[in-house]
Amino acid sequence: MQIHQGLSEIDPVGELHLAIGMFDGVHLGHQTVIDAAIHSARRSGGRCGVLTFWPHPSVLFRPENPTPQIMSPETKAGVLRELGIDFLIQQSFDRDYAATTAEGFLPLLLHHLPKLNAVYVGENWRFGRGRAGDVALLVREGVRLGVSVVSVPRLHHNGEAISSTRIRARLAAGDVKTANTLLGHTYFSRGAVTAGKRLGRELGFPTLNLPWSPGLQPGKGVYAVRVRGPGVSGARPGVANYGVRPTVENSAAEPLLEIHLLDTNGGCGWGPGDILTAEWLDFLRPEKKFGGLDALRAQIARDRDRALSFFGLSKKNES
């Protein structure tokens, strides 16, 4: 997959099919739009791509309260690559771009992508200065300029539309199971292991510490996770705490992701500098402050046992 920073970088080669949207989270609804572009491109022998934007428009128009994003541009690019697109355009959403009128949007695309054959959007997509453009206008302009417009209906789950807003709410509440259903893939975090204060080891539950600063912070608490990393095939079960560690830290601490692996056969094998991916599977409990280290140790043991039960493991699997 080729990644282009803005429309001006595109090499206009071959018939192009372009899915357009913010696509934060790349959820099931987004995937239907992108899949439509992929399948059409494959049938025609053309190339399929995605046009997305960074930062979110709210950063420009509502800087005091921007919409927190589920994914960073790098994370989003990785997920889009796995879908099988040929190229990705990451367009800066700045004042110059935001000034593009709705009527001027397709001409702008055609200026940079003269072989643009079709665009693919969600049925509720808005575009252009002041969000004045809708799918009906896009279709009219497409007919005039010879560009096909494919509008993909919204997907629903339990009677409610799947949206990034809905997923953000579920993640903030710690409800990763529902979020994963709506995403169509497992919510994950990725980071480099750093050396910690070794408090987990002193408590009898050594952890891998992953500093991680997502735009949207998931609910603070304890989760069942799968962990992937270098030198290990497949994923390893773990129990993770995401939070500020109120029992042992002051209130100004930054949230930290700490992971205790449940299968320690053969040793951990990972250490500082290793890049790990943690897939979040289930919420076990919210973060809380305990009266002391003994109470914290007892609760961690209960968290571990609950995670073992989630994975169908027993205590005899520990060593």
Image: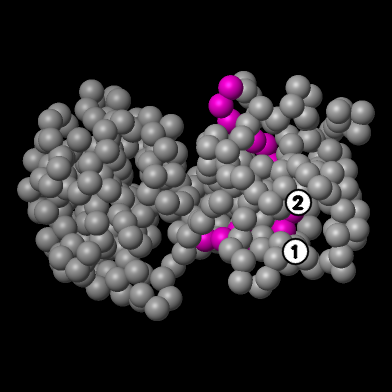
In the image, residue 81 lies at what x, y percent?
39, 34
Q: Is the residue under label 2 in contact with that under label 1 (CB below 8 Å)? A: yes
- Residue at 9% over, 40% down: 114
Q: Classify mark 2: residues with Cα within 10 Å, few (<14), some (14-19) or many (20+).
A: few
Residue to which mark 1 is pinned: 248
Q: In this view, does 247 lie above or below 2?
A: below
Q: Is residue 285 above or below residue 239?
A: below
What is the span of residues highlighted in magenta in the rendered image?
216-231
State the image coordinates of residue 3 (x, y, percent, origin top left).
27, 38
Q: Residue 199 carries which label?
A: 2
Q: What element carries label 2?
A: helix
- Looking at the image, residue 211 sits to the left or right of residue 150; the answer is right
Does residue 200 show up?
yes
Dot 1 falls on a residue whose secondary structure is loop
Q: Which percent across, then down, holds residue 305?
A: 88, 43
- Whether residue 280 appears in this view of the structure is no
The quarter of the displayed image where residue 294 is located: bottom right
Query: Label 1 vs label 2: CA separation?
Result: 9 Å
